[in-house]
Image (cartoon, grey):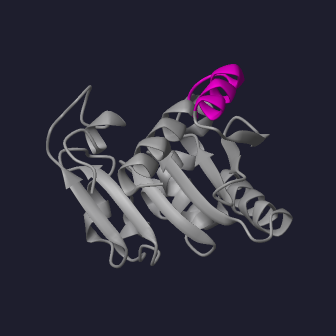
Amino acid sequence: MRQNQELSLLRDLSGASYMTHEDRARVAAENGLSMVDDRGELTAYKSEGKKKIYVSHRGTKSWRDIGSDVAVALGMESGNARFKRAKREVSRLVSENPGYRIVSTGHSLGGSLAEVSGKDVGKVVTFNKGAGLGSLYRSRGKYQKDYINEYDPVSMLTKYQRGGKLVKQRKVVGGVHSLKSSTSQRFK
């Protein structure tokens, strides 16, 4: 899969994480993937041909996510239940799928979850990832790429992380924090 095609797929999967189960299944089918796990806050898709598991983490959707948002803001993700579940589920997917590469993705809070749960086991691609005080001291994973809109206050501190790759965007499409604003101008 070419880089731009995979980036487009990851953006679609990140967007689908906010949709219904049926819509996530439709997005999977349209992209030749099978949905192997769907917990609402985390959905895993399998590509048999490419030997990859795509893990999409949903960002903030309701008031129930506020505790996780606060954990990101304060750099306390390691003590948050949702972050613990994400790490446990990604570890389970790794052990249940030997020989498959893990690719974690997400938008906003979902991007933070993808980073914390996926950077030690595979590739991570985030879109306007939530970044707080803990981001100032955290390194991106070696195989991590963060796409941000430079005007987005939620992902602003991402640019202070070391390692990996940061792709900055300036064009605003649908609001500075929208998924489209993180990648609307270019795919690199």
* Residue 130 visible here: no
The residue positioned farthest toward the right in the image shown: 96
The quarter of the picture where residue 80 lies is bottom right
Along the viewing direction, whichever of 70 and 141 lies nearer the viewer: 141
Predominant secondary structure in magenta?
helix
Residue 47: x %, y % from top left: 67, 50
Along the viewing direction, whichever of 21 and 69 lies nearer the viewer: 21
Q: Would residue 93 be found to the left or right of residue 5 on screen?
A: right
Q: Would residue 187 be found to the left or right of residue 28 on screen?
A: left
Q: Would residue 88 be found to the left or right of residue 56 on screen?
A: right
Along the viewing direction, whichever of 187 and 56 lies nearer the viewer: 187
Identity of the residue drawn at 67% across and 41% down: 33
Q: Which residues are magenta?
A: 17-30
Identity of the residue drawn at 62% across and 67% down: 78
Residue 89: x %, y % from top left: 76, 57
The mark total stands at 0
Identity of the residue drawn at 74% across and 55% down: 85
Image quadrant in which the C terminus is located: bottom left
Identity of the residue drawn at 39% across and 59% down: 132
Residue 8: x %, y % from top left: 41, 42
Residue 154: x %, y % from top left: 33, 47
* Residue 6 visible here: yes
